């Protein structure tokens, strides 16, 4: 694993799991298991490959904390080389879709 992949995985655990749990009360245990089992980049790719946004993304939207979502982390410029343009586009589209669906309610 490269230093960049290690840094991404560390942020997945620290931001998307720990910080989100502390600040929102939503502890994404399934997400943490996926990161531990597959690694941060592979777990992110698996989530992005799903047909629909994850339950965790919807929960973070409901708490107005999309900044703590895995998709937001994927879009950070320093991690651009870890993901394809398509994966980054999916992450951006999901953030936009769940954000718009919250406003439509």
Image: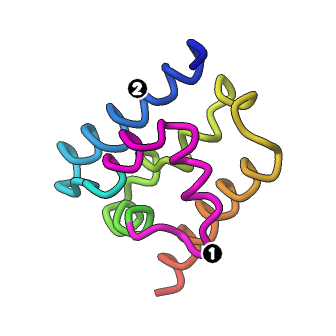
Quarter the N terminus occupies:
top right
Farthest bottom residue in view? 105
Farthest front residue in view? 37
Q: Which residues are magenta?
A: 32-55
Is 9 placed above or below 25 here?
above
- Ranked by sequence position, the earlier of labels 2 and 1 is 2
Label 2's element?
helix
The answer to whether mark 2 and mark 1 are in CB contact below 8 A is no
x 56%, y 50%: residue: 71
Given residues 81 and 97, the one toward you in this image is 81
Label 1's element?
loop
Quarter-of-image position of residue 78: top right
Is 100 placed above or below 94 here?
below
Given residues 71 and 65, the one toward you in this image is 71
Rendering coords of residue 101 (x, y %): 54, 79
x 75%, y 28%: residue: 81
Q: Residues within 10 Å of mark 2 (few under 14, many from 20)?
A: some
Query: What residue does disc 1 label?
Result: 51
Residue 2 in the magenta stretch? The answer is: no
x 69%, y 62%: residue: 93
Q: Main secondary structure of the magenta part?
A: helix
Give the spatial CA distance, label 2 vs label 1: 26 Å
Query: What residue does disc 2 label?
Result: 10
């Amino acid at each position: 694993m490269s230093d960049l992949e290690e840094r991404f995985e560390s942020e997945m655990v620290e931001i998307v799991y720990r910080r989100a749990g502390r600040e929102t009360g939503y502890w994404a245990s399934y997400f943490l298991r996926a990161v531990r089992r597959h690694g941060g980049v592979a777990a992110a790719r698996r989530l992005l490959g799903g047909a629909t946004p994850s339950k965790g993304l919807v929960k973070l939207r409901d708490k107005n904390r999309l900044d703590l979502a895995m998709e937001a982390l994927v879009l950070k410029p320093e991690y651009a080389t870890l993901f394809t343009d398509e994966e980054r586009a999916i992450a951006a589209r999901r953030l936009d879709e769940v954000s718009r669906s919250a406003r439509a309610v």
